[in-house]
Image: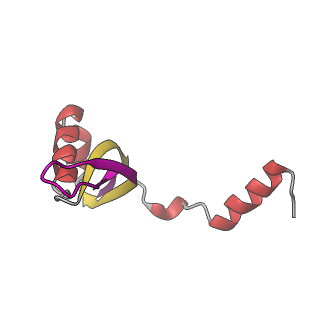
Amino acid sequence: MADIRITAQYYENYSDTDTPYWKPKGGQVFVIENASMDMVMYTNKDVLIEVLIKLVEKQSNEHSKYEYLEHEVDFIGESYAIHADDLMNELFKTLGNEE
């Protein structure tokens, strides 16, 4: 099994009329868990992206919308997590503020 992480642009509708005014507000990550590895690996990439775009767009409504940006397939899982403490220690070292 594999997880597919889809990165999307998140927009909010700032219009109070029938004509939407979409303003980009940040990113959103959607995760499809336990996808079939065979389906992911052997499906034409363009077809897979087309389907992912449709799935992301289905999350939209009149107040907010999402646009597909990219995706990644994780075959390993989250067993190789980097902890926040490690990030902070490396940032302090890099910035010259070692603890």
Q: Which residues are magenta?
A: 1-26
**Image: 79 above or below 54:** below
Q: Which SS type dominates the magenta stretch?
A: strand
Q: Residue at x 81, y 50 (%)?
A: 95
Q: Is residue 25 visible?
A: yes
Q: In the orientation shown, which residue stands out farthest toward the front? A: 17
Q: Residue at x 42, y 60 (%)?
A: 77
Q: Is residue 7 visible?
A: no
Q: Looking at the picture, tell me which residue is in the foreground, 76 or 5.
A: 5
Image quadrant occupied by the C terminus:
bottom right
Q: Residue 60 in the image: state x and y as whole percent.
A: 20, 56
Q: Residue 39 in the image: state x and y as whole percent.
A: 19, 46
Q: Residue 45 in the image: state x and y as whole percent.
A: 24, 34
Image quadrant occupied by the N terminus:
bottom left
Q: Looking at the picture, tell me which residue is in the foreground, 26 or 98.
A: 26
Q: Residue 67 in the image: state x and y as whole percent.
A: 27, 46
Rendered image quadrant of residue 71: top left
Q: Residue at x 39, y 53 (%)?
A: 25
Give yes or no for residue 65 being in the magenta stretch: no
Numbered disc total: 0
Q: In the orientation shown, which residue stands out farthest toward the left? A: 18
Rendered image quadrant of residue 82: bottom right
Q: Looking at the picture, tell me which residue is in the foreground, 53 or 63.
A: 63
Name the image colouring.
secondary structure
Viewed as shown, does residue 14 lie left or right of 82? left
Give yes or no for residue 5 being in the magenta stretch: yes
